[in-house]
Every structure is written in C-alpha cells, then in structure tokens.
Amino acid sequence: MYKQQGSFKRLAAAAAVLTFCALSVSACGGAFLNGGETSDAGDAGREVIKKPDKTITVIDTKPPAPADDGMEASKIDQLKGVRGMDWLSENRILIGKDNPNVKPVSAEGEKRSPINLYIRDLSGAQAQDEPLQETAGNQNFAEVSPDRKHVFYKANSEETARGYIMDLETRKIVPIGKETLQANAGEWADNERVIYPLFKGDIAATDVNGKTETLLHTSSAYVNSVSQRGSKIYYVNREILFVYDPQTKEKNMALAKPVTSFVPSPDGKQFAVVKKISDSEVELTITDAEMNNKFTLGSGSQISSLAWSPDGSKLAYAATSQDDEGVSGMFIADAVSGKTAQISVDMQYGPAYPPRWSPAGDKLMTSSVTLQGSDYVFNTYIISF
C-alpha cells in the first residue's frame, strides 16, 4: 500500500520498464487508470479504501491545501516526445531527444538515433531547439551546475556510462575520471565539482577542469545516494547511512539504517530519508540535520525520485503502492507543515528522470514514459505553482 497525507489517485507503474526505457535510446507519457475501490470513513482523520482482497489506508485525510501555500498547481504544460533534464534559466530548459541527423547506434539489437542534448526556450522566443553538441553517442542523465554554467551528463550504453562535464559557454568537454559509472550516479557537489561513486566502492570528485581526486575508499560495490553539503559527504552503503568529513578525516559515522535513499536539502539543514520498515514496505520522512524526525510523509513498496526545491521549503517525490499493479504517483510535500498533495500528471511508469525544480522554485519539471504500441514514448511536464 501507499499511505500519504493528502489525496490518493491511482496510476499504473512498472519500475523495471521505466529503468529499461530511460536507458534505451528510443524516444519515449502515461494514462490514469480508474480505480475500483470503495471508501469508508475510518477513525478521525483517516480514510480506508477497500478492495476485494486488500485494504489501503490513507492517513491524515484533509481538505485540499489552499492555493496560497505553494502546493496547488496553477498550470501544467506538456512537452511531447522529449526527456526533461534540467533548467538553464526560468524560461530555458535542457532536454534530451533523438537526433536523426547523426549516425544511428546499436541498442537491444536495433539501430536507433542517439539521444542528444538540446536547449528549449519555453517562452517561444527561439523557434527550434538548439543542440548542445551533436554526436553519434548518447548524451543522457544530464544535470546543470548550481550556477548554470556547466552541465554534467553521461554517454551511456545500457546501464553503464562515461561521465562528462561541458562548459555551456564554450561547449568544451572534459571527462569524469577514467572509469565507467552507473548511468544514474553522481551529482554536483558545488559549482565546480561533481561527486560520484565508482563500481569498486570509491567516492570521487571531478572539477570543471577535469581534475579528479578520490575522497573516500569504502571497498564496497553497494555505495549509493552520494551527496555533499559543505565539507560533509553523505552516502548509503548496504542500507546504512554514513557521513564523512574529509577535512577532519574523522571515522565515518553511521546515522541511520536500514536506508534505501537519502537526499539532503540544498542548505544541508533537512534530510529526506527513505527507510525500510518491512521486507516489502519503505517509509519517507523529513528530519533535521541531527536526524530528528520532523514529519512522516508516507509509505509504500517504493519511494524514489526525491527532489528538494532550491529554498528547501518543498520536496517532490514518487511513491508506488504495494498492490499487485504497483500503482504510483508524484507528490509534493511542504517541509514546514508536512502537508502533501498529488500532482495530477499522467505518470504511467513513474518519473523517467529525476524531477527538477526551476531556479526560483515555482515550477517543477518531470518526465514520464508510456508504451504506445511497440514503442516507448517520453513526455515532459512543466508544473507551475
């Protein structure tokens, strides 16, 4: 089941298909499914939805949040056939789409046009998308630096990739180290450096000039959720959340377990933590920097795609229920009040790429994928609040 504060809508989800589509080079929206549940009034503040062989409890059922709390979407724009990557400014975004002008690449036994990165002007001032740099290889899983001057992206082949940093002004490219990465690994530590885990267990960082340094040896192939705030490096290893400060070089400190995902707010004062509460259920909480629980936002079979707004006032995330269909949705949580609201966008297989907030924090970009006939089709949504 998925339990959340606020409304609950059902959408079809399949995590395995989503991962396959994001890694493939085929161009890939979704459709809401009508639920057949019945609803009974439970205890005060709770709603119980009954199905023939299951019961889903939605906790803290409340009226819709008022429009002035920043949780109500005022407009949703759909961009068909593209993968939304990140924001370059309030009106310019970085997208990924097939480039038919270059040599096709082989994927899953087929020849397909590679995914290249383009700049799209949402204001309409620019009639055509501008390619960053046309290439016969994939350019995927892109993230723009906090100062919007560089982009970190992957040239992926299936689930592994080589990482690169591009200067957005000169279009000069430097590689991320000499080893392959997981296709979805790594993020900006600050304006100058990307931090990432390696398959052998090291945590490394590469700056915009291509200089790479190893920050920590873990000797584990299970390191994930690597991030840095100030001098502190956070990471999850075998479902244990650790913090390490390379300046003091003190022994790694275990903060929590069993943790499946962790994202600190931009200022490092709040944490979004997904923990296992049973073999088939996880729970999302917001804590302070001392790991004191502020809010429990919900639980389900899977919670992923955590994304803080720039000011740390809101958290976007995806949640999948525990029923046989794996129904899911995208949600927004208010980090001050703990209120949650579902975003009414077609999300058949959940987010195809990490949700991204605009620099001002009043818009959210998220992408979905759906199967149309034998083709996977991507759509991107711009949600204005």
Image (spheres, grey):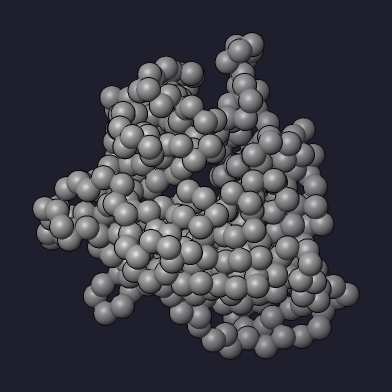
Q: Toward which corner of the image does residue 15 lie, by quadrant? A: bottom left
Residue 151 horizontal/vertical position (percent): 41, 40
Q: How many marks?
A: 0
Q: Toward which corner of the image does residue 68 lie, by quadrant? A: bottom right
Residue at image x 60%, y 60%? 363
Is 86 left or right of 372, judged from the image as shown?
right
- Relative to 33, say whether 153 is above or below: above
Residue 261 horizontal/vertical position (percent): 57, 44
Query: Does residue 55 appear anywhere in the picture?
Result: yes
Residue 49 horizontal/vertical position (percent): 69, 80
Rendered-image quadrant of the C terminus: bottom right
Rendered-image quadrant of the N terminus: bottom right
- Relative to 309, say whether 46 is above or below: below
Residue at image x 48%, y 64%? 123
Is 167 left or right of 74, judged from the image as shown?
left
Query: Does residue 108 appear anywhere in the picture?
Result: no
Q: Toward which corner of the image does residue 167 lie, by quadrant? A: top left
